[in-house]
Structures are given as C-alpha cells and as structure tokens.
C-alpha cells in the first residue's frame, strides 16, 4: 500500500464524492459507485473519520469503509 496517499477531508454533492488528499490533490468519484452511501442522509455522510493512518474512510454508523488507494485504482480502471 502506498502510505503517502492520505486523506485530509471529505465533501459531497449530488453527483460526486470529493476526497482532498494531504498533498493537495482532490479525488472525485461518482456517488453512483457507492450505493450504500447514496441511501443515507447528509448528516450520516458527514459523520466519517479517517482510518488506517489516513488511508481509508469509515462511516461507523453505516458500517462502511473505503480505501483511498482503491478509489484511485477504480478511477484508473475506468479511464483505461
């Protein structure tokens, strides 16, 4: 795992999950990729924490976890 890919903040809009990384990059992925997150309230979405030394995101109330590295891999696979 590339430990340098660490999250700094998470934001949402109607279409995208935005993850700002510590190095200043921002990852945008469609919310449609995360059916579990689409079915929640805005308050639940904002109740996240970074886990695994900042390399993952957890929504403990939802029992849902995302790896930032896997998000980047999905972006690369979709672009190929």
Image (tube, rainbow, N blue to C red):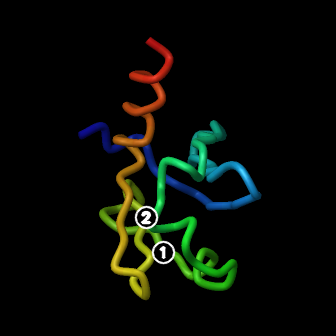
User: In this view of the protein, which residue sits in the foreground, 3 or 47?
Assistant: 47
User: In this view of the protein, which residue sits in the foreground, 72 or 20?
Assistant: 72
Q: Find residue 44 and report its horizontal and vertical position in percent.
A: 58, 83
Q: Residue furthest left?
A: 1
Q: Examine the image and state in which quarter residue 3 appears.
A: top left
The residue under the point 70% across, 60% down is 12
Please rate how many residues cluster around mark 2, counting C-alpha atoms within 10 Å: few if below 14, some from 14 to 19, many from 20. Answer: many
Q: Find residue 2 and report its horizontal and vertical position in percent.
A: 30, 37
> Under tag 2, what secondary structure?
strand
Indicate whether 73 appears above or below 43: above
Quadrant into which the N terminus falls: top left
Say whether residue 44 is left or right of residue 35. Answer: right
The residue under the point 58% across, 58% down is 8
The residue under the point 67% across, 49% down is 16
Asked whether the beta carbons under mark 2 and mark 1 sit within 8 Å of each other, the answer is yes
The residue under the point 41% across, 60% down is 54
Residue on which disc 2 sits: 57
Please rate how many residues cluster around mark 1, counting C-alpha atoms within 10 Å: few if below 14, some from 14 to 19, many from 20. Answer: some
């Amino acid at each position: 795992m590339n430990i340098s890919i660490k999250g700094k903040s998470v934001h949402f809009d109607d279409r995208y999950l935005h993850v700002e990384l510590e190095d200043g990059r921002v990852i945008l992925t469609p919310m449609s990729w995360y059916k579990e997150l689409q079915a929640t309230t805005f308050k639940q979405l904002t109740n996240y924490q970074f886990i695994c030394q900042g390399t993952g995101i957890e929504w403990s109330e939802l029992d849902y976890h995302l790896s930032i590295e896997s998000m980047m891999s999905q972006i690369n696979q979709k672009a190929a």
